[in-house]
C-alpha cells in the first residue's frame, strides 16, 4: 500500500527542478534588459552631446558684438564753413613803355584813388622817336599841300584844254598818295604820343597798394615777348569776396541773395554781414561741394584780403540728425556704411555724414535713434551675416 508521503515526494522534486531552471532564465532576461537600456541610454546621450556640440560650434562661429544707439542732436539751424577773403579786384600794374623809373609816389599800404599818379618813367628813346615822327609828318603835310595845289591847277587848266588829261590824272593821283603819307605819319605820331603818355603810371581803380616791386633808377622793360615785371600790385578792398565750398547736402542753403555772416578770431564777438551773390551751379565731383561767392562790405578796411574767416550760412529748413561714434563707420568700395543689428543679423546701411566732431560724426540720413549700431565692426563684416549682441554690451 502506497502512502500519501510517498506520493508527494516526486512532485516536490519536480517543482524544485523547475525553480532551478527558472532562476537562470530570469537572470538572463534581466541582463538582456539592462544591456538594451544601457545601449539606448548611450545612444541618446551621444545624440544630446552632438546637438550641444553643434550649438556650441555655431555659437562660437557667430561673432559677438557690442552695440550702441545713435544720439539725437538739436535741429541744425546753420552751417559754419571755412573761407578766405579776397579783394574784389586784384590787379598787377605793369609799364607800357621802356625807360628808367625816375620817381614813385606811393608805397605799400597806401590808399589811392582812381587816376592818382603812382610813378614817373623817363623814356629818352620814345621822346626822340616822337620828334622824328613829328618832323616826318610836317614834311608829308608840306608835300601834300604842294600836290593839292598842283592838282587843283591842272584841273582848272584842263577846262580850257591847256594841259593834257594824262598830266591832270597824274597830278590828282599824286595828291591822293601824299594824303596817304600824311595819314601814315599822323598815326605814327599818335602811337608815339600814347607811348610817351605811359611815362606816367596811374591807378586804374580805388584801392590799396599791396606790393611795390620797383625803385628809382630801375630799368623798365615793357617787352611783348618776355615776362615783364610788375611795378605795383593794387587791390580793391572796399568790398571783399569770400569763396566757400558748400557740401552737397547743404546746397539748398546756397541760393543767391541768401544772407551770410562772417566771424574772425582776431575780432572775437564781432559779426560781419555779407550776401551770397552767385554760385558755380555745379557740384565738384572730387569734393562733392558747391562753390559759392559771398560779398562782404568793408568800408572801414577792417577785413584784409587773404584772411581766414568762418562763414555762417542759415539753412532754409530744419535738418534733423543724429550722432554716432566715428569707430562705427565702415569705408567700403560702394560708399560709407554703418553696421546695424536687425533680427540677429548685421545690415550694412548707407549713411550721409554732416559735420565731423572728431570722436563723433553727424549722420544726416540712414539711421534712426532706435537702431543698434555695431561698435568697432570688423572689416570682414558682410551684409546679412549673423551676429550676437554681447550681454551688457549696449552703450
Image (tube, rainbow, N blue to C red):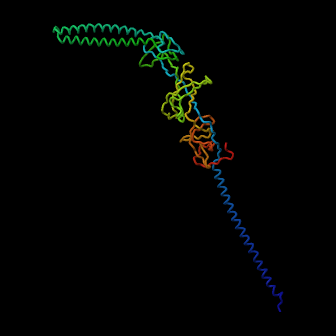
Residue reaching furthest bottom? 1
Write the residue at 50% across / 35% down.
285
State the image coordinates of residue 243 (x, y, percent, origin top left): 52, 27
Residue 287 in sight: no
Which quarter of the rendered picture does the C terminus lie within? top right
Taking the spot 65% from the left edge, 51% from the top edge, the residue there is 59
Q: Nearer the viewer, residue 348 or 251?
A: 251
Relative placement, left or right, of 21 versus 173 is right
Instruction: Answer above or below: position of 65 versus 26.
Output: above
Q: Is residue 325 above or below residue 94?
A: below
Q: Nearer the viewer, residue 100 or 363?
A: 363
Report x, y in % for residue 270: 61, 24
Q: Left or right of 97: which side holds 5?
A: right
On-image quarter of the N terminus: bottom right
Task: Answer with left or right where residue 226 lies relative to residue 24.
Answer: left
**From where the camera sits, is residue 182 visible?**
yes
Q: How many marks?
A: 0
* Residue at the left extreme, as displayed: 161
Where 56 sits versus 380, above or below?
Answer: below
- Residue 368: x %, y % from top left: 60, 42
Residue under the image location 73 percent in, 70 percent down: 31
Residue 6 lies in quadrant: bottom right
Which of the 4 image quarters holds residue 359?
top right
Q: Position of residue 252 (x, y in %)?
A: 52, 34
Report the front residue among 14 and 210. 210
Amino acid at each position: 500500500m502506497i502512502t500519501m508521503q510517498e506520493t508527494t515526494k516526486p512532485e516536490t522534486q519536480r517543482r524544485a527542478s523547475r525553480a532551478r531552471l527558472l532562476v537562470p532564465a530570469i537572470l538572463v532576461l534581466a541582463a538582456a534588459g539592462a544591456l538594451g537600456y544601457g545601449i539606448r541610454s548611450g545612444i541618446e546621450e551621444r545624440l544630446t552631446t552632438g546637438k550641444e556640440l553643434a550649438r556650441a560650434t555655431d555659437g562660437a562661429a557667430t561673432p559677438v558684438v557690442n552695440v550702441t544707439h545713435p544720439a539725437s542732436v538739436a535741429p541744425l539751424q546753420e552751417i559754419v564753413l571755412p573761407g578766405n577773403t579776397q579783394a574784389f579786384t586784384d590787379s598787377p600794374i605793369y609799364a607800357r613803355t621802356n625807360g628808367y623809373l625816375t620817381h614813385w609816389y606811393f608805397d605799400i599800404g597806401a590808399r589811392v584813388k582812381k587816376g592818382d599818379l603812382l610813378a614817373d618813367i623817363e623814356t629818352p628813346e620814345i621822346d626822340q622817336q616822337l620828334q622824328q615822327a613829328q618832323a616826318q609828318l610836317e614834311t608829308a603835310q608840306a608835300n601834300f599841300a604842294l600836290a593839292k595845289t598842283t592838282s587843283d591847277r591842272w584841273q582848272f587848266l584842263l577846262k580850257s584844254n591847256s594841259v593834257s588829261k594824262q598830266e591832270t590824272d597824274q597830278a590828282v593821283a599824286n595828291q591822293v598818295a601824299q594824303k596817304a603819307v600824311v595819314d601814315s605819319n599822323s598815326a605814327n605820331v599818335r602811337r608815339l604820343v600814347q607811348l610817351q603818355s605811359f611815362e606816367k603810371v596811374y591807378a586804374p581803380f580805388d584801392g590799396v597798394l599791396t606790393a611795390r616791386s620797383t625803385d628809382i633808377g630801375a630799368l623798365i622793360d615793357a617787352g611783348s615777348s618776355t615776362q615783364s615785371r610788375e611795378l605795383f600790385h593794387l587791390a580793391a578792398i572796399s568790398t571783399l569776396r569770400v569763396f566757400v565750398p558748400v557740401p552737397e547736402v547743404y546746397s539748398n542753403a546756397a541760393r543767391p541773395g541768401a544772407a551770410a555772416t562772417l566771424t574772425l578770431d582776431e575780432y572775437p564777438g564781432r559779426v560781419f554781414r555779407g550776401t551770397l551773390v552767385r554760385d558755380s551751379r555745379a557740384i565738384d565731383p572730387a569734393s562733392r561741394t558747391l562753390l559759392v561767392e559771398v560779398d562782404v562790405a568793408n568800408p572801414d578796411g577792417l577785413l584784409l584780403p587773404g584772411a581766414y574767416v568762418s562763414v555762417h550760412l542759415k539753412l532754409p529748413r530744419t535738418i534733423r540728425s543724429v550722432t554716432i561714434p566715428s569707430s562705427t563707420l565702415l569705408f567700403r568700395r560702394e560708399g560709407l556704411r554703418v553696421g546695424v543689428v536687425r533680427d540677429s543679423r548685421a545690415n550694412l546701411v548707407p549713411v550721409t555724414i554732416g559735420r565731423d566732431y572728431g570722436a563723433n560724426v553727424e549722420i544726416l540720413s540712414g539711421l534712426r535713434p532706435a537702431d543698434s549700431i555695431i561698435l568697432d565692426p570688423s572689416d570682414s563684416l558682410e551684409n546679412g551675416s549673423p551676429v550676437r549682441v554681447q550681454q551688457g554690451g549696449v552703450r
